[in-house]
Amino acid sequence: MPKEIKNETPRRRVILAARRLFNDKGFHSTPVSELATEARVSVGQIYRLFPGKDDIIVAIAEEDVQARVGEMEVIFEAVERKEYSVFDAVRAIAKASIITNGGGLVFEILAEAYRNPRVFERIKVLCVPYRDGIRRLITLARPDGSARELDAHVEIMIACFFGLGHRALIASTMDIEQASHEAACILLRALNAPHDLATKSSKKRDAR
């Protein structure tokens, strides 16, 4: 049994095992019996913890979204303390988008959301706090933007961050620091942010 599963609760063991199996084999190619063996629980216990197999993939998505939103909150707090500039914030979120990429598992979650309306609706709700965080980020860069402009920028920025998360598929030797810096420059220019926001990092951060 993998070390990271051994001392976890049954529910957590199922999620950790599902992450590995769904990523390696695919959601539909992983039978519940194999998942139970990997997680060291019974099939019946899985269904007591999760009403259906699709609830497991939603639980994985929930963990991932909560982690991303938590990362963003830390970044926003740094901006409020003036330890981060808006440029730093965009760069940090771009970097997190690259580093926290879930590989094939992300595509399994998205594919199931397209196939299964129930999963789609639940993941759509889960993503609301993430969208709100992106809107907050854009508002920092363009406090004068209209609601319509902000909505459009949210869609574009989410698409960019999502795409950054999968650059490793075609650029395995990518320099993450450089990629996130360049992404921040391009995104802030695209937002038509004030010049000082689009080009300067926090002095406190640079002094470290």
Image (cartoon, helix red, strand yellow):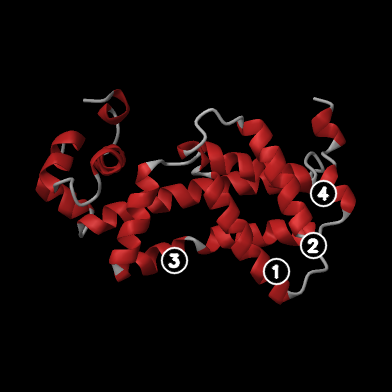
Q: Three-letter amino acid code at disc 1?
A: Leu
Q: Is residue 59 visible?
A: no
From the viewer's perspective, tell me whether residue 110 is left or right of residue 164: left
Q: CA distance from mark 2 to mark 1?
A: 8 Å
Up-down: is 143 above or below 21? below
* Residue at disc 3, secondary structure: helix
From the viewer's perspective, tell me whether residue 130 is left or right of residue 203: left
Q: Which residue is mark 4?
A: 198
Residue 162, x across and y down, in percent: 53, 51
Quadrant position of the N terminus in the picture: top left
Labelled pair 2, 3 in contact (Cβ < 8 Å): no
Q: Which residue is mark 3?
A: 124
At horizontal 89% and vertical 48% (from top left) the residue drawn is 196
Q: Three-letter amino acid code at disc 4?
A: Ala
From the viewer's perspective, tell me whether residue 29 is left or right of residue 176: left
At horizontal 75% and vertical 46% (from top left) the residue drawn is 185
Q: Which residue is mark 2?
A: 142
Q: Give the mark, 4 or 3, whose residue is nearer the N terminus.
A: 3
Labelled pair 4, 3 in contact (Cβ < 8 Å): no
Q: Is residue 29 visible?
A: yes
Q: CA distance from mark 1 to mark 3?
A: 19 Å
Labelled pair 2, 1 in contact (Cβ < 8 Å): yes
Up-down: is 144 above or below 27? below
Q: CA distance from mark 4 to mark 3?
A: 31 Å
